[in-house]
Image: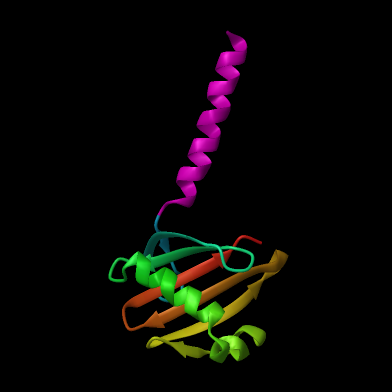
Amino acid sequence: MKLFIVVVAALLVVASMAAADGRAHTHGGSGLTTRPCGYLSAGKGWRVHATRNVRCISARKLVRTFFSAPRCLAAQRHPGTAFTVGGYRCIERALPDDVGLVHCTRPRRLVAARSNH
């Protein structure tokens, strides 16, 4: 019986951690609130978020284009360099622990992607 309680408690902890990652995020500088838009398996893997006025499929496509289009390579190789993709101004930043962050913005719209590591 004790083992069952421990297993159930462990499952609840894991489930609550997973739910915490699925919450909406408010981005400091812009103040825009985003929702999770899934995972993109490009390179090291990216979790994509977007404001409600951007379809998730469009958000993932925008980030995929940023990483796959040869014309975007300069912005990827020089973090902090802005580049326009599909009318969005995209900037990639390097964070500690080899984490990457991409913000693509238009007026009142935001697509953000954060790498796994």
Instruction: Classify 56 as above or below 23.
Output: below
Residue 85 position by quadrant = bottom left
Left or right position of 56 against 11: left
**Residue 48, horizontal then vertical, whole percent:** 47, 64
Instruction: Classify 30 as above or below 38.
Output: below
Instruction: Classify 78 as above or below 39.
Output: below
Residue 77 position by quadrant = bottom right
Q: In which quarter of the image is the N terminus?
A: top right
Q: How is the image coloured?
A: rainbow
**Residue 114, horizontal then vertical, whole percent:** 55, 66
Residue stretch rendered in magenta on the structure? 1-23
Q: Which residue is drawn at 50% across and 30% down?
A: 12
As rendered, which of 24 and 42 lies closer to the eye? 42
- Examine the structure image and report whether residue 13 is included in the region drawn in magenta: yes
Q: Residue at x 62, y 91 (%)?
A: 74
The single residue placed furthest to the left in the displayed view is: 53
Q: Residue at x 60, y 78 (%)?
A: 93
Instruction: Classify 104 as above or below 41.
Output: below
Q: Which residue is drawn at 53% across and 75% down?
A: 102
**Residue 78, horizontal then vertical, whole percent:** 65, 87
Q: In which quarter of the image is the C terminus?
A: bottom right
Main secondary structure along the magenta-highlighted residues: helix
